[in-house]
Amino acid sequence: MNNTIKCILERKSVRQYSKQAIERETIELLVRAAMAAPSAKNRQPWTFIAITQKGMLIQLSDGLPYAKMVKDAPCAIIVCGDLSRTKEEDKNKWVVDCSAATENLLLAAESLGLGAVWTGVYPDTDRVEFVSKCLNLPDFVIPLNVIPVGHPSGENKPKDKFKPELLKWERWE
């Protein structure tokens, strides 16, 4: 099996992290991988906010119901859609584009031996408002998710999610 397929199949959601810090260069590498994602008309309607300050990680953890693990991570990367980089006819494509960037980030983390998990923000209005206020986001920037990243602690095993019954050949039957 080649390394890319192996990395994809071994990716897992990691919610427990050691205290070991993540170097700035590693965070930049994760975001570089995220930015290599495809996007509609190559608009690249994303922006990323890396958080390493413990106080802000705790604040995000306290305000997001499904992101309690953020307080224990050495870093969180918030993937945001920048609507100033879209056109009216493409205004809803930012979600798909930023989701592709998020998956690249998650796979890059896995390939580097790091743990990460996608915690949703958008489209929940309360979560979007909370994160926007915490990070002082302008109105044209919408947080899609918060990705805590760290060195995994505990047992984390990938799940085999392949279901042959969901693969159709040639047409729907």
Image (cartoon, rainbow, N blue to C red):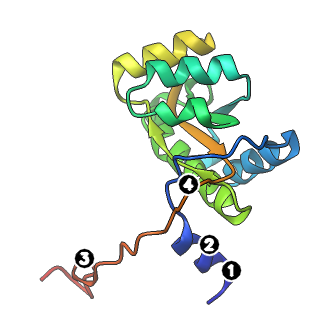
Task: Judge left or right: residue 120 versus residue 149.
Answer: left
| Comes first in the chain, label 1 or label 3 | 1
- Asked if the residue at tag 2 contacts the one at tag 1, i.e. Cβ–Cβ closer than 8 Å, the answer is yes
| Comes first in the chain, label 1 or label 4 | 1
Q: Compared with residue 77, is residue 60 higher up or lower down, i.e. above or below?
A: above
Q: Amino acid at mark 2?
A: Cys
Q: Amino acid at mark 1?
A: Asn
| Comes first in the chain, label 4 or label 2 | 2
* Residue 3 appears anywhere in the view: yes
> Could you tell me which quadrant the N terminus lies in?
bottom right
Residue 173 drawn at (x, y percent): 12, 83
* Residue 141 appears anywhere in the view: no
Helix, strand or loop for disc 1 = helix
- Mark 1 → mark 4, Cα distance in angstroms: 16 Å
| Comes first in the chain, label 2 or label 3 | 2
Residue at the disc numbered 4: 103
User: Viewer-nearest of labels 4 and 2?
Assistant: 2
Residue at the disc numbered 3: 166
Residue at the disc numbered 1: 3
Residue 8 drawn at (x, y percent): 56, 71
Helix, strand or loop for disc 2 = helix
The residue positioned 38% from the left and 27% from the top of the image is 65
The residue positioned 48% from the left and 69% from the top of the image is 158
Dividing the picture into quarters, in which one does residue 84 lie? top right
